[in-house]
Image (cartoon, rainbow, N blue to C red):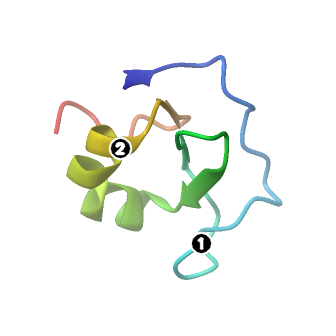
């Protein structure tokens, strides 16, 4: 997994897959599907995302060095 900016940028219209808040993190999974999360849910699921995602876009730096 890499953290990158090559993944499609998030727009204000993108919403968290868990709660519907504005998305801050996009994780691309093997096979090309993606998940988007708000800052809260991105931090909550960061360890699992890093384990399974092929790429992660963190537009706001919410994942930091966790």
Q: Is residue 57 visible?
A: yes
Res. 59 image quadrant: top right
Looking at the image, do the residues carrying marks 1 and 2 touch, with CB atoms under 8 Å apart? Answer: no
Is residue 63 visible in the rendered image? The answer is: no
In screen coordinates, is 39 left or right of 15? left
Position of the C terminus, as image quadrant, is top left
Q: Nearest the camera: 22 or 50? A: 50
Nearer to the camera, 30 or 37: 30
Left or right: where does residue 43 sit relative to residue 55? Answer: left
Q: Residues within 10 Å of mark 2 (few under 14, many from 20)?
A: few
Residue 34 position within the rendered picture, expressed as x and y whole percent measured from the top left:
63, 50
- Give the label on residue 47, or none: none
Instruction: Report x, y in % for residue 4.
Output: 52, 19
Q: How many marks overall?
A: 2
Kindly identify which residue carries mark 1. Answer: 17
Residue at which label 2 appears: 52
> Residue visible at 67% across and 40% down?
32
- Measuring from the top left, give residue 47's x and y in whole percent: 21, 49
């Amino acid at each position: 997994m890499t953290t990158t900016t090559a993944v499609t940028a998030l727009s204000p219209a993108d919403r968290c897959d868990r709660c519907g808040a504005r998305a801050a993190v996009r994780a691309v999974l093997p096979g090309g599907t993606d998940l988007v999360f708000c800052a809260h849910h991105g931090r909550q699921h960061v360890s699992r995302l890093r384990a399974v995602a092929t790429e992660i876009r963190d537009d706001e730096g919410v994942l930091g060095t966790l």
